[in-house]
Amino acid sequence: MTRNGHALQLLTYVFAAIDHGSLRQAARVLRVQESSVSRNVVKLEQLLEMQLFERNVHGVRLTETGRAWIEIVRDHYDGLLDAFAERVRDNKDAKTLRIGLCWVTGGEFLKRLIARFNELYPDVRLAIEDVPARQRLAAIRRRRFDIVFTHGVGADKTCRSEVFWQERLFVLLPSSHSLVEKPMLKWSDLADMCLLVPVGLDGPPLDLRLLERIAADGGPAVQTCRANRATIIFKVQLGQGVTLAEASYARTVATDSAQWKPLDGNNSVSSIRGIWLDSNPKRAVLRLVGLAKNMAAAERGPEWVKQPGVTASAILPSLFPESRPAAISSLCPCEPKSLHGQRDTSPDDRQPKYG
């Protein structure tokens, strides 16, 4: 930092004192302590090696040398303020929030988050695009995206990440399979099957290492396929195996010759996290992250899965009523509710803590 690195900030205090005729009035306008105004005026005088003000019980007034210097500086100062204000008005990038989705279909939480953000900040334009798994961290670091919502991500010291919501995993079975009669499935039910995982240009939608560990513990054998999800679903219809997806995807994709069934037990829930840069200068990023944190905190109840062995009985979605036994609650993992079964309208999700 140069010796005059804070000169513009110091000038703010000086011009406030000039405009209002006293340090006390300047402090009131700037919403700081009078001692803070006095201290910063003295700093500028020491920087310039010039006395700017004469001080008395009635206030402050410029010295002759101070007045001559201020007359020169004032136009430059006002011009800088105008330039900053114009830059903020014309900076379209600052008013655009670029959101990347990596194998994330959406889900009720993300829909509510975006709807609430649009309500609070209508001047910010949201640009939502897909981002391949292999590029998600690089896209954040290079600021091609401001925030990316994704599943598992390796450790990376350059990016911040936090889990914002969870979704129940569903398995797609051929309609003719005997397991379609069961309301819920466990990994052990799929032990003799082939789990088809798409690994096209976008990379796998789930953590392959986790799936391989599940297979080693008696789960289905993992078969990666150079295909997209539509092709994988077609292979399931042909009876060549089964596949996985989150509840939000299962709700939007249905087929007559295959059925989605919820998984229960260990590793049956997928956590979706946001990734962003702390150094991103956009206020909109901090506002979206703060809003997401507040909404996530308000909606996390007993249905928030902290232990891998928690059962689906409390959070099995009502997306598929024909698969839901009468004894199971209709609470939906995509649409968390309060302890009393009503949508949580806690004031905590109304305003973000940031911005």
Image: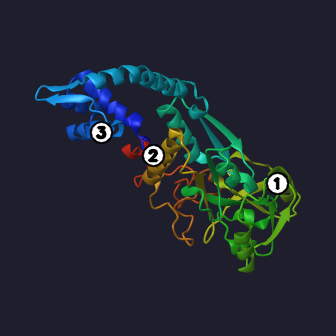
Marks 3 and 2, how far apart at CA: 51 Å
User: What percent of the width, then of the height, locates residue 2?
Assistant: 46, 45
The answer to whether residue 103 is visible is: no
Question: Looking at the image, is mark 3 or mark 2 nearer the viewer?
Answer: 3
Characterize the local packing of mark 3: few (<14), some (14-19) or many (20 or more) Cα atoms within 10 angstroms.
Answer: some
- Looking at the image, tell me whether mark 1 or mark 2 is earlier in sequence order: 1
Badge count: 3
Spot occupied by residue 195 in the image (x, y as percentages of width and height): 79, 66
Q: Secondary structure at mark 2?
A: loop
Kindly report the distance in space between the C-alpha atoms of the residues bearing marks 1 and 3. Answer: 68 Å
Q: Which residue is mark 1?
A: 233
Give the answer, above or below, for where 216 lies relative to 40. Answer: below
Q: Between tags 1 and 3, which lies in front?
A: 3
Regarding mark 1 in the picture, which secondary structure is present there? Answer: helix
Tell me residue 336's x, y (percent): 50, 52
Residue in view at x 73 percent, y 58 percent = 205
Of labels 3 and 2, earlier in sequence is 3
Q: Which residue is mark 2?
A: 343
Residue with the mark numbered 3: 40
Residue at image position (67%, 55%) is 137
